[in-house]
Image (tube, rainbow, N blue to C red):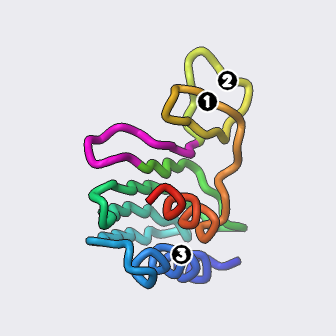
């Protein structure tokens, strides 16, 4: 998949929130860099004032590689509902990709497809 194809698919996934009437505001910032790299920063405020934050650093030189990412969904007070990320932890978790739940549990989980992720967010509304 090319970088432009990935970005178009990503935008369509986020647009699904707007299409269903769940978005109060959507702010997507894309920084395309040399060597087929990109940085995505997204903030979506939903109709119940919960907030979705997405940060992603991509390297698409040979294939789409999510060098780092964090997809966090939080309630109106800022309390995390869930987050997917691939940040290193101390102590070491034993896996890179993982999900944080609101009760503090961290478990191995790959980031779902953007459409599945959006569906998961919508299911909490």
Quick one: label 2 or label 3, which is nearer the N terminus?
3
- Image coordinates of residue 101 in percent, x first then y, are 55, 36
> Closer to the observer: label 2 or label 1?
1
- Image coordinates of residue 54 in percent, x first then y, are 43, 56
- Image coordinates of residue 70 in percent, x first then y, are 49, 48
SS of the residue under disc 1? strand
State the separation of the CA atoms marked 2 and 3.
30 Å
> Closer to the observer: label 2 or label 3?
3
SS of the residue under disc 2? loop
In the image, residue 35 above or below residue 97: below
Residue 72 is one of the magenta-drawn residues: no
Are the residues tagged 2 and 1 within 8 Å (C-beta)?
yes
Task: Kindly identify the residue that appears in the image at 38 percent across and 46 percent down.
Answer: 74
Q: Quadrant of residue 62?
A: bottom right
- Image coordinates of residue 107 in percent, x first then y, are 68, 32
From which residue to which does the magenta span run? 74-85
For label 1, the residue is 106
Give the side of residue 116 with respect to residue 44, left or right: right
Give the side of residue 18 with respect to residue 113, left or right: left
Quick one: label 3 or label 1, which is nearer the N terminus?
3
For label 3, the residue is 13
Counting the numbered discs, the total is 3
SS of the residue under disc 3? helix
For label 2, the residue is 93
Q: Nearer the viewer, residue 41 or 80?
A: 80
Quarter containing the C terminus: bottom left
Task: Kindly identify the residue that appears in the image at 56 percent across and 18 percent down.
Answer: 90
């Amino acid at each position: 998949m090319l970088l432009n194809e990935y970005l178009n698919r990503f935008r369509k996934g986020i647009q699904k929130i707007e299409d269903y009437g769940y978005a109060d505001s959507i702010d997507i910032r894309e920084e395309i860099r040399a060597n087929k790299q990109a940085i995505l920063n997204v903030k979506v405020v939903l109709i119940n004032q919960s907030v979705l934050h997405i940060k992603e650093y991509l390297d698409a030189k040979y294939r789409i590689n999510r060098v780092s990412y964090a997809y966090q969904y939080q309630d109106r007070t800022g309390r995390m509902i869930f987050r997917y990320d691939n940040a290193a932890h101390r102590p070491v978790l034993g896996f890179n990709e993982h999900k944080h739940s609101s009760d503090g549990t961290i478990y191995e989980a790959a980031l779902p497809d953007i459409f599945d992720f959006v569906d998961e967010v919508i299911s909490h509304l």
